[in-house]
Image: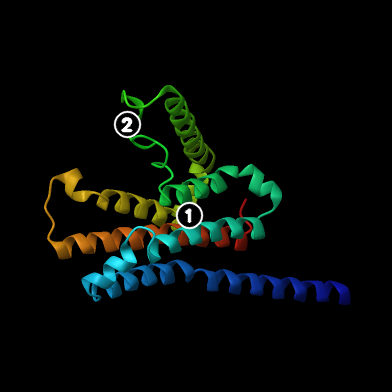
Amino acid sequence: MANQDQKTLYDIAMNNNQNHTSSSSRIWLPLALILLIFTMGLMTLMDADEQKKLLTENGLFESLTVYLYILCLILIFIFWSWKKIITKWYFSALIILFALRELDYDKANFTHGVLKSRQYFSDLVGFPELIASISILIFIVLVLGSIIIKEKDSFIEGIKSLKQSQLAVLVSIILVIITKTIDGIERKFGIDLSPPGERFALIVEEVGEMGIPIMFAIAILSWRNKNQT
């Protein structure tokens, strides 16, 4: 009886500890959103030269974004089992693809860029380069398709249940849409922005892109805490 009572007390203590950990981890997402908004606001208060230094190619925010993607991979290998890493290989692959995209490897050594339609119809693209482009594009489609097919149901259910992991992924999707819409907004929508407007758009784009791996990291840690598979 004493052993049973001790076991019951132990189970209660463990459950309380897990509930405390879960409750404390729920603040990560709102804190991350506050951090991104605060950073954007702080950037708008800087003068144009300081903004340019931070927002330029290979500047602070672009470098931080790449490092954060690397951090996401490290978190996966620290907190996920090998079985989970292999089973859900498409998450690691997606993070690597995002990091390579941030480093502009989708354009490096390609005439127009792997993600540009001109790459597949231009006479300037040689046959070996075309085959390489198609192979990479097929891999990207495979990764995205695997995520949609295998994670769609749990993602929708998680959003309905307000689970932090799925909410963080949802925010990352929203950030992808926002940043890709802002990127080249004048060319895409035929609008003319004033210099301050251009700088503000660039701030939102660069800080928003940095927010994507932050959301990935929150999702990875939340999956760990909730023992999700």
Q: Between marks 2 and 1, how big is the CA–CA gap?
A: 31 Å
Is 204 on the left-hand or right-hand side of 114?
left
Against 179, is 117 above or below? above
Q: Which element carries disc 1, helix, strand or loop?
A: helix
Depth-wise, is mark 2 or mark 1 nearer the camera? Answer: 2
Does the rendering let one see residue 69? Answer: yes
Seen at 42% across and 52% down, the residue is 102
Q: Is residue 162 visible?
A: no
- Residue 225: x %, y % from top left: 61, 63
Residue at horizontal 66 percent and vertical 60 percent from the top: 78
Q: Is residue 14 above or below residue 71?
A: below
Instruction: Please tell me in which quadrant of the rendered image residue 112 appears.
Output: top left
Q: Which residue is mark 2?
A: 117
The kind of residue tagged 2 is: Ser
Q: Name the amino acid, label 1.
A: Gln
Characterize the local packing of mark 2: few (<14), some (14-19) or many (20 or more) Cα atoms within 10 angstroms: few
Q: Nearer the viewer, residue 96 or 35?
A: 96
Residue 21 drawn at (x, y percent) = 60, 72
- Name which of mark 2 and mark 1 comes first in the sequence: 2
Q: Which residue is mark 1?
A: 166
Where's residue 151, x and y in %?
52, 43
